[in-house]
Amino acid sequence: MTRRDFLKNSALGVGGATAAMLGLQIVNPKELFAAVAEEKGKTRWAFLVDTYKCVGCGMCVKACKTENEIPWEANASRTWVERYVITKDGKRYADSPKAARDGFTNSKIDLGEGHEVEVKAEDIDKAFFVPKLCNQCEDPACVQACPVGATYQVPDGVVLIDRKWCIGCGYCIMACPYGVRFFNPVTHTAEKCTFCYHRISQGLMPACVDACAFGARKIGNLKDPEDPVTKIIKTERVGVLKSDFGTKPQVFYIGLDEEVK
Amino acid sequence: METLIHGEFWTLKELFVLPNEYIVWSIQIVMYPFMTGLVAGAFVLSSLYHVFGVKQLKDIARFALVFSFSLLFAAPIPLLLHLQQPFRALNVILTPHFTSAIAAFSVVFFTYAAIVAGELWFLYRKHLIETYQMYKGKEKKSLWDSLMVILFGALTLGAMDLSEKALHKDEKAIKFLAALGIPVAAFLHGYVGFIFGSVKANALWMTPLMPVIFIVSAIVSGVALCVLTYIITLEIRKFLAAGKAKRAEAHVKIPQIDSADLSVIQLSVRYLVIFLVFAISLELLDLIFRGYTAVKSWDILRSVIYKNDFVPVFVLQYGIGDALPLLLFLLPGFSMRRALIGTICVLFGVFMMRWNVVIGGQAFSLTFAGFMHYQLPIIPHDIETLKEGLMGIIGVFIAPFCFFWVVNKIFPVFVKKAAVAGGS
């Protein structure tokens, strides 16, 4: 092969490959959503948790596990309920055994590694329950951390995961300040609460909201000023979890306590 | 076992830990920065000769470069073993999401690999051509010889010019690539530090010092491994040659092989000490700063560092990994044996530093009110505990030496001096 032939063939090869590659297009999720979204910019999902109303029954966790097919016995859940107990002598306890799937049915507090402690009712200063779920942050640390773009934010604010593209590196799990993410034991990909996106995008309520008999969990659209949840968030005193991480969480709490981690 | 969450098997939870929290990044993520650190460190050692002209390090420099190249193949293995979906690993290259530190891995890694491979090629060009011509010149070629002709022919890339001028150009290229390689090697490892340091959710990891600490400790570990392997390889060769000489008949002359030159080892160790002092200073600075500023996370970090992880941090990392080798290297009466023990201690210390960062960073809950304890799976009972257990790390430890054995066949470290560029 002469040098001339070599150059000629290389040019042909590179040119041909480039022409073929031009047919492929990398889809930018943002552009895609902009093209298909019917009500552009009219929705921003947010969640409202009224901790005063939560009784720790665990029905939300049961409903979530069933709805989202997270194995019943798996020690992880897209949503969970925490119990906080502060005693008169200043001791602070908190637990969420089995993500509170079975509810808090007795006064024994789980200390991990099989240990429990019994706290008498008369020794308690204050005690309360705090439901937790994905905060669908405005600036999600998990989306920033995903090396392949398998987790992404849709225009209405919810963060989703592409189970077919996730490589399972766990960086998003590390990046989330709220510990909402885990590896799905069946799909072996990252997993988290999506506000039941398959339901809310069809006009239904998330499974946990439907399951809560006490109205402790509510979902609303922040861009709709008439939405009752939006009204509460706008006009009442609500708090968010771990605001110092700068992720701008969108799950708002009524009755948040300093103790809540 | 479909209900077991990844990490659940080796995580013990104490007090208030969130339901989804487990030690997700386990032993292979300890191995990953350890291996990349060795790659970067070995390269820096080789550059000391090529760029800064530290003449005494000529032999060990060549060794370090070949070894760095072998380690390079081993560096991504822990990542693949760690991934839950290893067959999708190429997604990182197909759709890199550049806001993520991990997305840059392929770019940084392959840039660095190209530089090392390029330098190696220029260094061994003369050897490759001579080997090619030797096999080609054989009258009766066996199948093996023909394969070698193809292999070495391909490796020469068709550049057969062995003139004085061409060889001089080779040397210039080596120097250029070695110089270019230093910042890239530093970047390769600094960026590994960035992967950890940029995780704002993790109170132990999040510090801008992390990339710097990683770079310096990488150089420490790389130099230590090169010195260690260099001594051992020469001893093995000496032992084998002695055995051969014993068996050989009196009239056959077997060339005698010397041990490593103590002055070379001493000089390498001197560089090692400089970087070691840097590494210790940075790590202590980080610790002191955290204690002094004592922000919200300090309470839990203090109980992890001073209580739960006291032995791995202060005894294994600072004691055996830092203080002991410093004594061994600096006390008068330096010997080969002390170099050997010292470098093993240094390597162990750097490994423990990685361990204390990766595992220690997950030893406490996001609630700051609970702990997670890691139990390394020893005997595997499924694929997960095989990959991310003792067997997995033994495999990763052995891999670079296997690669070295293969790479050494093509790019022999111990060649006659005239056969490589800059050797005459």
Image (tube, coloured by chain):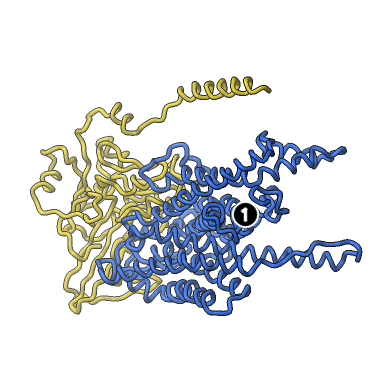
Mark yes or no: residue B241 visible.
yes
- Dot 1 corresponds to which residue? B62
Nearer to the camera, B127 or A22: B127
**Chain depicted in yellow:** A
Outermost residue on the front side: it is: B164
Quadrant of the rendered image containing residue A166:
top left
Q: Give residue B232's position: percent from left, percent from top.
A: 66, 66
The chain whose colour is blue is: B
Front position in the image: B191 or A164: B191
Q: In the image, A186: left or right of B423? A: left
**Mark 1, chain letter?**
B
Q: Amino acid at mark 1?
A: Arg
Q: Is residue A45 above or below residue A116?
A: above
The image shows residue B75 at horizontal and vertical percentages of 54, 52
The residue that appears at 25% across and 54% down in the rendered structure is: A245
The percent coordinates of residue A114 (x first, y second) are 40, 72
Residue B374 position, x and y percent, is 45, 67
Q: Residue at x 49, y 66 (%)?
A: B350
- Residue plotted at (47% across, 75% down): B323
